[in-house]
């Protein structure tokens, strides 16, 4: 058993070549055997003094991960396009710009691309042709805009563009069906297009330290959004207070009556789809209310004390506009904090405003 584990560990080591932190200003593969070149899956050249990506990297034709971060790179050679199995390219903290990439860079099968900490003023159009890309990071550059062609990255799950000079969010960004994490913090963004409400997979949206004065109401329809970071913006207070409430349907009113009055029912009394619907009832988090809701609820942000030091805004759900906390006029009272603590965690969304 131990011999098998040892062999597996040795094989894993053979797949990795680590030339990081060696103060290299050139890189040659002349002293590396053909077998080793064939077997190498990960190549680390980070933390050196390379000014351009050497063409010899193309000799590692089975390479899947390439890390060339923290060099002085100003150019990426054409040879990289011959790495047809490359999935991850890390090129952080270099001197790359939109003219540094080879023309056929978009032909790569990349899934992860990190160009953070470089000198890009535009997102290269070659990057918008990476159809398999799932994670794109170009934070800490000099980007002034996001191209409409970003919509072509339909496999994208994470987009990090924080720390740039971006002033507008293109509505085409809403055409990314799998986008889960969107980071646009530390820019100059003044408004959010309502089309972003179509990002149905979005779970985290970071917009802190921008120039936002309002948010579109449509953003409340992002039902899977778990974190919305807004601190450092001149947001008007009315966004926090004005929440959408759609009146309940006749079906929901009937369901509320059955559940709140504890009227017994069974699969023999009604169709299965109605029984299933009734089982999906959510209890109103207000401890002074015995009501329930299904699809129609009031979204309300309440501020609570956190460790006696911070006031944390939390968005929760109530069964009707009349169902408000009796302590709402005193947002820092102990009674309100106790009430908030009774809210189920899975019915809360965190909104970071300060």
Image (cartoon, rainbow, N blue to C red):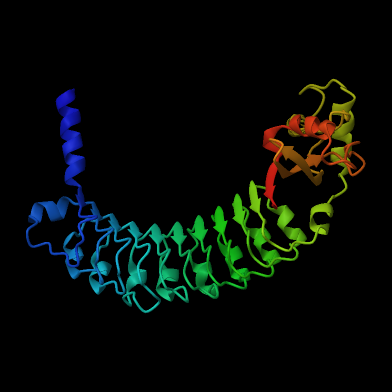
Residue at 57 percent of width and 72 percent of height = 166
Q: Is residue 283 visible?
A: no
Q: Position of residue 314 (x, y in %)?
A: 73, 43
Q: Quadrant of residue 321?
A: top right
Q: Nearer the viewer, residue 211 or 126?
A: 211
Q: Position of residue 54 (x, y in %)?
A: 20, 69
Horizontal relation, residue 16 to residue 146: left or right: left
Horizontal relation, residue 8 to residue 347: left or right: left
Q: Is residue 323 visible?
A: yes
Residue at 80 percent of width and 31 percent of height = 339
Measured along the vertical axis of the image, is residue 44 above or below residue 126? above
Q: Position of residue 33 (x, y in %)?
A: 7, 55
Q: Nearer the viewer, residue 253 or 169?
A: 169
Q: Quadrant of residue 302?
A: top right
Q: Position of residue 36 (x, y in %)?
A: 12, 52
Quarter of the N terminus within the rendering:
top left
Q: Nearer the viewer, residue 159 or 327?
A: 327
Horizontal relation, residue 249 to residue 175: left or right: right
């Amino acid at each position: 058993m131990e011999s098998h584990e040892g062999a597996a560990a040795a094989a894993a080591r053979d797949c990795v070549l680590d030339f990081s932190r060696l103060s290299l200003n050139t890189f040659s593969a002349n002293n590396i055997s053909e077998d080793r070149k064939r077997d190498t899956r990960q190549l680390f050249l980070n933390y050196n003094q390379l000014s351009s990506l050497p063409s010899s990297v193309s000799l590692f034709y089975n390479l899947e991960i390439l890390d060339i971060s923290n060099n002085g790179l100003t150019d990426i050679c054409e040879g990289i396009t011959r790495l047809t199995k490359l999935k991850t390219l890390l090129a952080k903290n270099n001197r790359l710009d939109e003219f540094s990439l080879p023309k056929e860079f978009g032909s790569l099968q990349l899934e992860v691309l990190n160009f953070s900490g470089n000198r890009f003023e535009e997102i290269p159009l070659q990057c918008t042709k990476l159809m398999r890309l799932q994670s794109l990071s170009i934070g800490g550059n000099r980007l002034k805009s996001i191209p409409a062609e970003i919509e072509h990255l339909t496999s994208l799950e994470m987009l990090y563009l924080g720390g740039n000079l971006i002033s507008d969010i293109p509505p085409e960004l809403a055409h990314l069906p799998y986008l889960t994490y969107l980071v646009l913090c530390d820019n100059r963004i003044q408004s959010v297009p309502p089309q972003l409400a179509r990002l149905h997979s979005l779970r985290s949206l970071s917009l802190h330290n921008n120039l936002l004065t309002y948010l579109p109401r449509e953003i409340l329809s992002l039902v899977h959004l778990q974190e919305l970071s807004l601190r450092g913006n001149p947001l008007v207070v009315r966004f926090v207070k004005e929440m959408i409430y759609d009146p309940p349907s006749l079906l929901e009113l009937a369901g509320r009556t059955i559940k709140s009055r504890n009227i017994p029912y069974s699969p023999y009394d009604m169709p299965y789809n109605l029984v299933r619907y009734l089982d999906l009832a959510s209890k109103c988090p207000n401890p002074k209310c015995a009501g329930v809701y299904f699809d129609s609820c009031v979204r309300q942000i309440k501020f609570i004390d956190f460790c006696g030091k911070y006031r944390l805004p939390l968005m929760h759900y109530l069964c009707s506009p009349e169902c408000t906390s009796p302590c709402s006029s005193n947002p820092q009272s102990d009674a309100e904090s106790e009430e908030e603590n009774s809210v189920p965690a899975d019915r809360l969304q965190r909104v970071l405003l300060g």
